[in-house]
Structures are given as C-alpha cells and as structure tokens.
Amino acid sequence: MTPPRAATRVSSPARAVVSSVEGRLLPVLALSLLMLLAWTGLLAAQQEKIIKSHGFSEFGDLKYPEGFAHFDYVNPDAPKGGELSYAAQGTFDSLNPFSRQGRAAARSGDQYESLLTPSYDEPGTYYGLLAESLEYPESQDWVIFNLRPEAKFSDGTPVTAEDVVFSHELLLDQGLKSYADAVRKRIPKAEALGPHRVKFYFSPDYPRRAMISQVGGTPVFSKAWFMADPEHRRLDKSRMVPGIGSGPYVLESYDTNRRVIYRRNPDYWGDHLNVNVGRNNFDTIRIEYFSDSIAALEAFKAGEITFRRENNSKSWASAYDFPAISNGWVVRRELEDGNVPSNAGFVMNLDRPQFQDIRVREAVQLAYNFEWTNESLQYGLFRHRSSFWQNSPLEAKGLPEGREREVLDALGDKLDPAILTSEPVMAHESRAERPNDRKNLRAAMKLLDDAGWAVGQDGIRRNASGEVLKIEFLSADPVMDRLVMPFAENLRTMGIDASYNRIDDAQFTLRRRERDFDMIYAAYPSSLEPSTGLYQLYGEEAASYSVFNPSGVHGPDIEALIDNIVQAKTREDLEANARALDRVLRSKRFMVPTWYLGKYWVAFWDMYEYPDLPPYALGFEDLWWINTDKAAKLKSSGALR
C-alpha cells in the first residue's frame, strides 16, 4: 500500500515569494482567459455568415435577382389615370384601421407601407419596399433593415429608423392584444442604429421562422404625427382623422357610412421602385357603401360603381342579364385563384357549455346539408370543403404515414390515438333531393341522446339539469338568411332550440370581438407557408381573446404541432407537420365546413384591363388599369356619365 504523502510545508519567506508570484500571475491569467474567450467569440461571429439581400424567403432562393426590373405579373407600361369604383357593405365610423373600437373604412390601412412587400407569385417571399436591403446572420438571431433614404411620408417628411421603432412599440402598447402579447415575447427589442438603419432582436426562447417577415411587414407610422397630439391620436381609439403614411394613395374625402375616396399621391416617393413598376395605376379609388349586396348590385348595373367582385352564387347565376351586359358594356370573368381556399364555415363558440361535448358538435355538423344547399340555393357552383388546406400539399389525406406519422407518434399522450388509425375527418355527404337528410339526422339525434340531451314531451332537448339545448346563429349579412334558415330548421327537427338573429354591422362586430355568440359564419385564413400566425389562430395562450380564433379552439396537440411548424427548417418538415395539424383540427369538429370556389367571380364595365395575373392575387386595385379609349367610348355612348 502506498503510504500517504506528507504535507508540503513552506517556510514563511518561501510563502511570501509564492504569494507574490500568485499576485502577479492571477490577473495575467484572468486577462488571458478573457482575451481567449473574446477571441473565441470573435471567431464564432466571423464564422457565422452574415447575409445581405434585397429580399427574404423562408425557404429556397428568391425568384427575382437584385436589381430586377419589375415583377413578371405586372404590365410595366400600364397607363396611369382614371377611377376604380366598387362597393363595400355595411357602415364605417373610423379612419383608423388599428382601433380596438368601431369599424374602419375600407382601405384605410393601405396608406401605411412596410419595410418589405410580398411577391404575388412566390409563397412566403418578400422584397424591399421602405427598406432597400436587409442583413441577418444564418442563425436569424436579429435582422437589420437599411431604409431607402428617399422614402417620405405623404407630408414630405422623411421615413426614418426612429419611425420604424416607434411603430413597432406603438403596436405593442396600443395594438390588438392578441398581436401585442405574441410579438412582445418574440421580438424583445428594436433600435435605430442610424437615421436609415434599424435593428430587430429576436428572443432566444422562440424559433426564428417568420420573425424576419413579420417585422418586415410591420406598418410604419409617422412618429411626429402621433406625438403632436398623443392623447387624441391613439392607435387603439376610433377617430375620423387619418394618420400619415408613406403609401401611394392618400385620403381625398369621405362621407360617413356612404363613401370614401382615395387619390394617388402625385408626389409619392416610391413610383420608381422595381416593386412598384406597373402598379398603383388609378388616379382615384372610390368605395361606395351599401346596406346589402342587392343594393350594391343595382348600383353596379346603373354604372354608379364600375367594378364588382361577386360572392353571391344566386346573383352570379341569375342577376347578370341586364341591358349593359347585352350591349357589351359590362363583361364577366371567372379568374383562377391559386390561394388556399378560405376556411369558411359555421363556427361554434367552444366557450359555450352546449358545445363542450364533441358528440354535440358532430351532431350539429350532420344537420347541415351542403349538397341540397349547393344545388337548390347556390346553383351547383361550389364544392364542399373538408380540409384547412384544401387542394394543397398541406392537406391531410388517407392514413398518416411517413414523416407525418412520425410527427403524430411524437405527440404521445397529447394525441387522440384514434387519429393514428383513421383517415382524416371529411365533410359528410347528404342527399340533394331535400334539405333534411333523414339518415344523417337520425345519426345526429343518436349522438345527442348519447351526450345526455334527451328529448322531452315538448320535443325539446334538455340535459339532466333541465337546461334546454339552445343554439343562436348570429349574422349581419342578409345573404346568409336563406342559407342559415334550412340549417336551423334541421336543428329544430332534432329537438334543438335553434334560432337565427340578424343584427346590424356595429353590433355584430362588437359581439364577434367579445365572442358573445353561439354560432357565426366565419373563416380561418390559411397560407402555403404557415408560421407564427398559427398561435393567434389556434394557440393556447391567445385562445381566450384572439379575434382571429372565433371558436377558441386549442389543445396540447395543436400547440405542439404549431411549435413544430414554426421550427421547421425544411419545406418537407413544414408540410408534414401542417398535414398533421390539419388532421387534428378536423378531428376537433369545431366548425361546420361549407363551400369553396377556387375562382374569382368578377364583373366590370368594359374599360378595365389586366395583365397575366399571378397565382396568389387578383390584384384589381393595384395591377389593373383603365383603357382610356374604352372609357371614352362608354361615356360617349351614354353608358357612363
């Protein structure tokens, strides 16, 4: 056995020498260590590539190179001039589109520009607008935007980095809660590095996807305008005084609840930009307000408005036989729409106790007869939607397999295991001969019985506590009357106390915003590159208040899949997780899916022309133009004043 080592003893003089040496060496060693760490950090920073670009794409390369002349989908020689006029329905009592109160006038937010602008032929791709370039590391921990020095607000004052920072902070302080709460955590800081250079920092606790495009899409306000009267010029208050933006159009005049007119700013700073070539072609844009779509159509027939985007199948099929059509003065077009169809349907408010049981929700779905509605009321023009990403690579189909199956397996006990062994929930089929499909209604009533809603002697369903099963449909649109009534009647046939209540626009906006309804017709937007916006649509934290989530749907399975989508590094991973989310959302049955078209229905007086349209935008407000010869001919013939 080795004996223990004797302790080394140092004499006092020797200890003094050692202490003296240590006293000199320790600071030197500490300094050397700090220098080494700094050098290591510098090397790491140098090794991380800094990307500088004229645009940004979430995945893949940009289609348009630096210095491109114009987008492919514009007519670079489109003439400027004339007026675009179309209808809006309802009322407005504000010119502030970001207010938490009231209803803003149409296009009131278009005067504000952002740092980047989207491309209409590349999903998830953006090019410089107020910013001429952007810089970011491969990690995307931050982004710097270099503003165009020539950018100016409509009052002639320059757009600066301070305005960008102010706008970001104002939206957090006075903007919608669902937006502010989500963004504040992900983007903790913005700072002006100079008059035309602004930097955004991203939180290390959140994935990077869509961070750059989100800040790049922030509307930019004039700090000087807001600060001149901060009490009355709040972002969260309704006001009839428009703010100052930098966009191509400014407010010309308005008549509350009747019309609003915008004129092209002759001093607009950005006319020469490649992203604006061939765009913003009308001298004025006039929007007339009507109480309903029937009145708006009559105004179109009379030439009071000259462009109409139709959304009523009955009108499209039967109302376009007026003299101006016969004379060739008005033309109709069906133009392809390459966007993901709107996720529209009858949305159930999951905060309501009657919708807590999924069997009740499935029964409500079965009461809707799409086939009869489409054939009898909509002239057979629509198709039935099932998916939240209908007709796209993100739509779930068949049994889950491959990467999608791996994604779902990883959810563990967060996931209903039946999803793994079942095809995705599809919109049910009904017989088109009559509004009430008896087979579906029998199945629905069995579900209600199983859920504890028994039918009483009066034919009304009640639960064990004696509470009546009630459902109120809420709407502000007269067009919905004929579509909701048969649905409500089927629910009454099943013993549900169903009613339909059409209210005015202001009440509807308030009640929808406060989620004070049982069911409404609403839509959840979708894109081909979903990202952080999903938290406002389906996320758990914002579910109780988000105006973008009318049902309030959420869950740990949904949350985990949103996280995966936001963290996706490849398109393959994005699409697999989106398909999984589609499958999960459909299984929740919080919406009765209705119809989709996949086309634009447009009619216009024959003086408008358009280029070869891009797949993801109709662009009638910014890509179309007026043929002055055709316009003059219509006026000389007396067709238009």
Image (cartoon, rainbow, N blue to C red):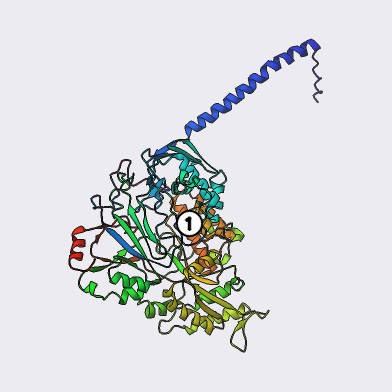
Q: Is residue 320 magenta?
A: no
**Residue 460 left/right relative to 607:** right
Q: Is residue 67 magenta?
A: yes
Work out whether 520 lies above or below 228: below
Looking at the rendered image, the quarter that the C terminus falls into is: bottom left
Q: Position of residue 196 (x, y in %)?
A: 42, 37
Please name the predominant secondary structure of the magenta segment in the image.
loop
Work out whether 243 lies above or below 583: above
Tell me if I can see residue 504 in this picture.
yes
Which of 503 and 272 lies nearest the eye of the viewer? 503
**Number of numbered labels in the structure image:** 1
- For this orientation, the residue located farthest to the top is 13
Query: Tag 1, which secondary structure?
Result: loop
Span shown in magenta: 59-68
Which of 458 and 630 lies nearest the eye of the viewer? 630
Instruction: Using the rendered view, name the quadrant where residue 498 is placed.
Output: bottom right
Q: Which residue is mark 1?
A: 239
Which of 288 and 570 lies nearest the eye of the viewer? 288
Tell me if I can see residue 136 in this picture.
no
Give, as a three-letter code, the residue at label 1. Arg
Q: Position of residue 115 (x, y in %)?
A: 41, 45
Q: Residues within 10 Å of mark 1 (few under 14, many from 20)?
A: many
**Residue 347 left/right relative to 71:** right
Work out whether 296 lies above or below 559: below
Looking at the rendered image, the quarter that the N terminus falls into is: top right
Q: Position of residue 586 (x, y in %)?
A: 50, 66
